[in-house]
Image (cartoon, helix red, strand yellow):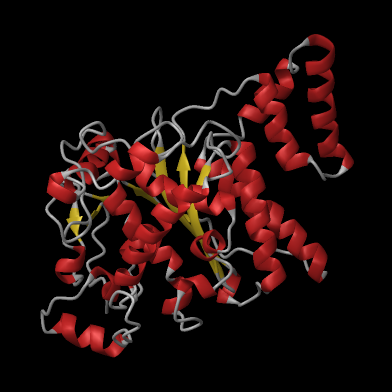
Amino acid sequence: MRRTRIKVKNRAAVYHCVSRIVGAQRLLDDLGKETLVRLLRRLATFCGLEVITYCIMSNHFHVLVRVPAEQNPTDEELVERMKALYGKAKPREAGLLYEAEKGLHDHGRVDADIRKRMLARMGDVSAFMKEFKQRFSKWYNIRHQRFGTLWAERFRSVLVEDQTGVLETVSAYIDLNAVRAGLVEDPKDYRHCGYAAAVAGDAKARSGLLSLYTGGSGGASQSGAEAGGGQRAGAPGEEAGAVAGPRGQDARAPFLAGAQVAAGSEGGRESKVKEHEWKEVGVEYRRRLFVRGGVSGGSGKAAMSREQIRRVLKRGGELSVGEVLRMRIRHMTDGVVLGSKGFVDAVWLAHRERFGSKRRSGARPIRGGGTALAGLRALRDLRVDAIS
């Protein structure tokens, strides 16, 4: 029997969501991937969610999304969100938008029933993913004259601690998908991921990656202490307790001081990111992405092969986070909750009734990841090495 999905209520939360094509078939061509990205953006705007990054492969996709603490848009904001989703919709759906606009124009408010129906679809990762997959399935089946299910199963999700060090690791893992698959050597060359879109100038993709350092639409990321964990998580391999930076500063400090992202379209963030902000964040993320991608700085030195990585880990040798992230890590998709020990334990305590009475703690180490992933914990004990 499958376990109920762990979700956070009444405060912002980040989820790493994954879904696969039925039978692991490679059905997504370039047009399919681009259509998924467009739908992802439209639906995220409608639901008030923030897409941090994503990667669309031929047989599955990854999305890292931040869900805000609450959804209470004004009627004017509600209509704008509906326009983002229904602007080119079929008459039945466009009719809802027409009625909402008419009510706002004639009476200064959206009809209460329409507002209730729209809000029921917002601010929840499950509702978002359900509609995302269903809408794409309809488009795909019509285009290819097929019927039946397209997705193999319900989507998998991992609740991720909203801290820079943890988010950078998960985000890099997602953006490195095509590198792990051997399709490209540099993630900027794989057009269907968030990092490549940001490098190409996409404002929303840049806004998502900017939020790694500035926090979500509500401001700076919530600390582990606020979540009940007591400590904040640094990057994997660092001591838990701080997001490491110069002289013990929070690593986000330079970005928090300089970022001027006003409330706006996507997830409460301005979709247009100032060029100087992206240059600063882009350089930082690329440096970390390349270190995590197994390339030494800007030298272009070739990364270790998968076989080499396995041998080094088997011998108990140390590897960089980047070298480890070039391998598939089950905990990133199946760990249920991912973050510092304090954060994972806090989530476990909040959902204690779902676990057996003999279990005494929540956080479980990521086995076989060496010192590179030593700072990360998962809620689910997979009882397998991270890299096998």
At a point 50% along the width and 47% down the height, the residue shown is: 207
Residue 139 in sight in this render:
yes
Residue 220 found in image quarter = top left
Residue 259 found in image quarter = top left
Question: Relative to the observer, which residue lies in front, 374 or 321?
Answer: 321
Q: Is residue 286 left or right of residue 308?
A: right
At a point 72% along the width and 34% down the height, the residue shown is: 82
| The C terminus - image quarter | bottom left
Question: Relative to the observer, which residue lies in front, 99 or 130?
Answer: 99
Compared with residue 112, is residue 266 higher up or lower down, i.e. above or below? Answer: below
At a point 31% along the width and 88% down the height, the residue shown is: 305
| The N terminus - image quarter | bottom left
Q: Residue furthest top?
A: 107
Q: Residue furthest right?
A: 91
Compared with residue 226, is residue 156 higher up or lower down, i.e. above or below? Answer: below
Q: How many marks?
A: 0
Image position, residue 147 (x, y; %): 77, 65
Question: Relative to the observer, which residue lies in front, 319 or 122?
Answer: 319
At a point 34% along the width and 71% down the height, the residue shown is: 290
Compared with residue 337, is residue 27 higher up or lower down, i.e. above or below? Answer: below
Image position, residue 100 (x, y; %): 78, 24
Q: Is residue 46 left or right of residue 101?
A: left
Image position, residue 152 (x, y; %): 57, 65
Residue 334 in sight in this render:
no
Image position, residue 372 (x, y; %): 19, 67
Q: Is residue 225 left or right of residue 275?
A: left
Q: Is residue 206 left or right of residue 295?
A: right
